[in-house]
Amino acid sequence: MTTSPAWLYYAFGVAMIVVAAYGVVLLTLGLVCRRPYGWDVDVAHTFMGVAMSGMFVSSWAFGPSAAWELVFAGIAAWFLVRSMRSIQRFGFHVPHEWIHAVMSVAMVLMLLFVVAPVAGRSMSMGVASTTRIEPGLTLVLAFLLLGSAVFTLASPVKGISHHASRLQFAVVSGTAQSDVADPVALSGTERVIAAPMLEDVSHVVMCFAMAFMLILMN
């Protein structure tokens, strides 16, 4: 496995905790304000952030890998179903749900192919499993994740990482829908905490961290 400075692993670990905490804040805000937009993405980011932090810093990891694998397998299935429903509803397009399904599959693979790390050290510096992810698959997943990060940053439609299908449909059709998260209608606090740009940044950070870990495992 590729080795990197220990501080870099801690930096990524902290970033993952921040993304997970932000996911919890968004979930809480959605419940309190009764605006459950993108709640499934927030749940996914929360679990991914917690699990990824344990991959970068072993002392932060907890729970059996099998349990985490089941969690992410379930999340992947959820987003695959949502992707199909989005295509049925809005016509042929690339729904935002698909990248979250890809991220969940990547999490399952990372958990399957890396065993418990050396105590007190980063998982990337730990003991690799006897089998490894096919390098070609690793690179494809990393490419998709980095591509999603670049697309999210470049997209003129902010909040696309959480609400892409609905937002895109509203923009194209020029009509308002009750299930579209409209930043203008948000209160002052909501507008700051649930700013579409912040949602996108959390997604981009997660994509970069996962791509980095996949490359380390290659």
Image (tube, rainbow, N blue to C red):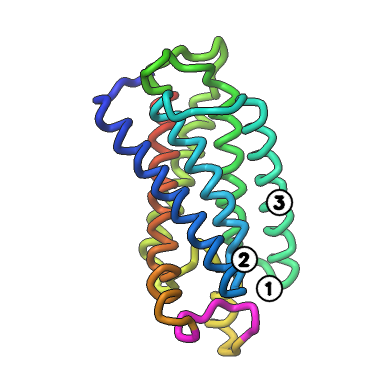
| Residue positioned 31% across, 33% down in the render | 10
Tell me the quarter of the picture where residue 37 sits. bottom right
| Residue positioned 51% across, 55% down in the render | 24
**Label 1 neighbour load within 10 Å: few <14, some 14-19, many 20+:** few
Asked whether disc 2 touches disc 1, contact meaning CB atoms under 8 Å apart, the reply is yes
Q: Which residue is mark 1?
A: 90
Magenta span main SS? loop
- What is the span of residues highlighted in magenta in the rendered image? 177-185
Q: Which residue is mark 3?
A: 78
Label drawn at residue 93: 2
Rendering coords of residue 76 (x, y %): 66, 45
Query: Which is more foreground, mark 2 or mark 3?
Result: 3
Label drawn at residue 24: none
| Residue positioned 54% across, 17% down in the render | 115
Q: Nearer the viewer, residue 111 or 167?
A: 111
Question: Which tag, 2 or 3, sits closer to the chain's start?
Answer: 3
Rendering coords of residue 138 (x, y %): 49, 31
Distance (Cα) linking label 3 and label 1? 18 Å
Amino acid type indicated by mark 2: His
Amino acid type indicated by mark 1: Phe
